[in-house]
Image (cartoon, grey):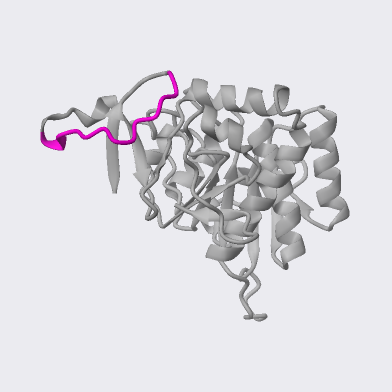
Amino acid sequence: MLQFVPYTLKSRSVEGIKVCRSVIDKSSFVPLARRKYNRMVKYLNQSEAINVDKDLFEKYKFSVDQLMELAGQSCAVAIAKSYPLSSDSEDASSNRVLVCCGPGNNGGDGLVCARHLKLFGYSPEIYYPKRTNNELYQRLLHQCIENDVLVLENQRIEEATANSTVFLHKYVVVVDALLGFSFRPPVREPFVHIIDMLKSTSVPICSVDIPSGWDVERGPPEDGGIKPQMLISLTAPKMCASKFDGKFHYLGGRFVPEKLESQYNLNLPKYVGTDFVVRL
């Protein structure tokens, strides 16, 4: 069930506010998802998402690789929950997962996710069209290679076969970790073709934090964009997640300090036991 409250760049609690939905223009309101325990999960705009990350790094002294490891592991756990390992040994594609990684933190989450999927028994393959000289990402890629994760070296997926749609059908799921919440439209090379492929495929897509090509606040582009079957929001959901109408929506990244949650009025759902993710 969705409730709508006036949009504001400031983080303020809105619990207890009642609005008449019949007379309110919902397009100007921030969506908040009501949980069964009667709390309201906040959806972050872009500036709030940036500030939350900044506080995690500067005030709470988390390192980038520390949060990336926890986020990527959360993604792998959520995928394993929604797309369990198949016992069909005769189907070569039954446990193959394509992980598409971009050059930023979203792509780093994808590299970590691929490594953990391998440890879980899947057969992940990495598509990494725009690499970086950043030492952290080089280490993450090296870890994948040393764990026998196949990397599609020196080739773009669209060159692998004349029929790119058929190519993607080799996989049980495609992980979209290309572009994160800092993305500003339009999509540029070398991501145009792969995103076009993801828009047209029937293979389930799992987007990490933000579906690639979506605006972090407004959601999908006018042409519809990628329509993932699964979305894994990290730290806290972003505003664009209100436009997600897929089958599985998880929150991952169980590392938010209570003080930070209170500061931004995040009202995050409670994780069960030792789980890394929670279903939204």
Residue at 67% of width from left, 38% of height from top? 107
| Residue 247 rendering spot, x and y as whole percentages | 41, 57
Residue 262: in magenta span: no
For residue 191, say whether it is visible: no
Residue at 71% of width from left, 38% of height from top? 67
Q: Residue furthest left?
A: 22
For residue 26, say whether it is visible: yes
Q: Quadrant of residue 104?
A: top right
Q: Provide the major secondary structure of the magenta segment.
A: loop
Quick one: 250 or 123, which is closer to the camera? 250
| Residue 178 rendering spot, x and y as whole percentages | 60, 37
Quick one: 191 or 236, which is closer to the camera? 236
Region rendered in magenta: 10-22
| 223 to 111, vertically: above or below | above
Residue at 16% of width from left, 29% of height from top? 24
Is 131 left or right of 20, judged from the image as shown? right
Q: Quadrant of residue 108?
A: top right
Residue at 64% of width from left, 80% of height from top? 87
| Residue 213 rendering spot, x and y as whole percentages | 48, 33
| 49 to 87, vertically: above or below | above
Residue 12: in magenta span: yes
The number of numbered discs placed on residues in the rendered structure image is 0
| Residue 150 rendering spot, x and y as whole percentages | 77, 55
Q: Residue furthest right?
A: 146
